[in-house]
Image (cartoon, rainbow, N blue to C red):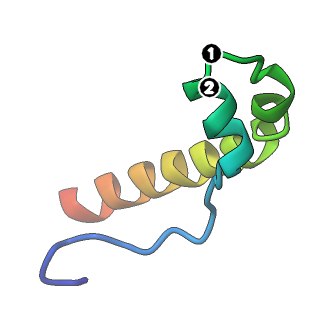
């Protein structure tokens, strides 16, 4: 990973197959997506933290 200049991020968002299938079929996915809001926010927060940390480190 060092050669690619990337870092691991532990957080993730897993979209359930049922939600994906409902979307493909044109169904209601609001409930399925609402359940993903918290993990998505955690992931975005982690990415923003790494962005700031790596920007500082690479500028040094």
**Foreground of the two, 29 or 60:** 29
Q: Secondary structure at mark 1?
A: loop
The answer to whether 56 appears left or right of 12 in the picture is left
The residue most toward the left is 3
Q: Residues within 10 Å of mark 2 (few under 14, many from 20)?
A: some
Q: Residues within 10 Å of mark 1 (few under 14, many from 20)?
A: few
Q: Circle 2 — which element?
A: helix
Q: Residue at x 59, y 71 (%)?
A: 10
Left or right, residue 33 beside residue 17: right
Residue 9 locus on image (x, y percent): 51, 68
Q: Which residue is mark 2?
A: 23
Q: Residue at x 25, y 83 (%)?
A: 1
Q: Residue 31 at x, y = what percent?
A: 87, 27
| Badge 1 vs badge 2, beta-carbon distance below 8 Å | yes
Query: Is residue 60 in sight in this rendering?
Result: no
Q: Which residue is mark 1?
A: 26
**Up-down: is 35 above or below 52?**
above
Q: Quadrant location of residue 20?
A: top right
Q: Which mark is residue 36?
A: none
From this view, report whether residue 11 is shown above or below residue 47. below
Residue 28 position, x and y percent, is 77, 17
Answer with left or right where residue 60 lies relative to residue 39.
Answer: left
Direction bottom: furthest residue:
2
Q: Is residue 35 left or right of residue 40?
A: right
Q: What residue sits 20% from the left and 72% below the top? A: 5
Measured as percent of width and height from the top left, residue 53 is found at: 42, 59
**Which sits in the foreground, 27 or 16?**
27
Q: In the rendered view of the protein, which quadrant contains the C terminus?
A: bottom left
Q: Residue at x 59, y 54 (%)?
A: 46
Q: Nearer the viewer, residue 33 or 10?
A: 33
Asked if one can make out residue 52 in the rendered structure from this viewpoint, the answer is yes
Mark 1 vs mark 2, CA separation in Å = 5 Å
């Amino acid at each position: 990973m060092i050669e690619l200049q990337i870092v691991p991020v532990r957080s993730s968002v897993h979209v359930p197959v049922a939600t994906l299938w409902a979307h493909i079929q044109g169904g209601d996915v609001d409930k399925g997506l609402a359940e993903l809001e918290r993990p998505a926010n955690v992931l975005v927060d982690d990415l923003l933290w790494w962005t700031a940390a790596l920007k500082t480190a690479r500028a040094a």
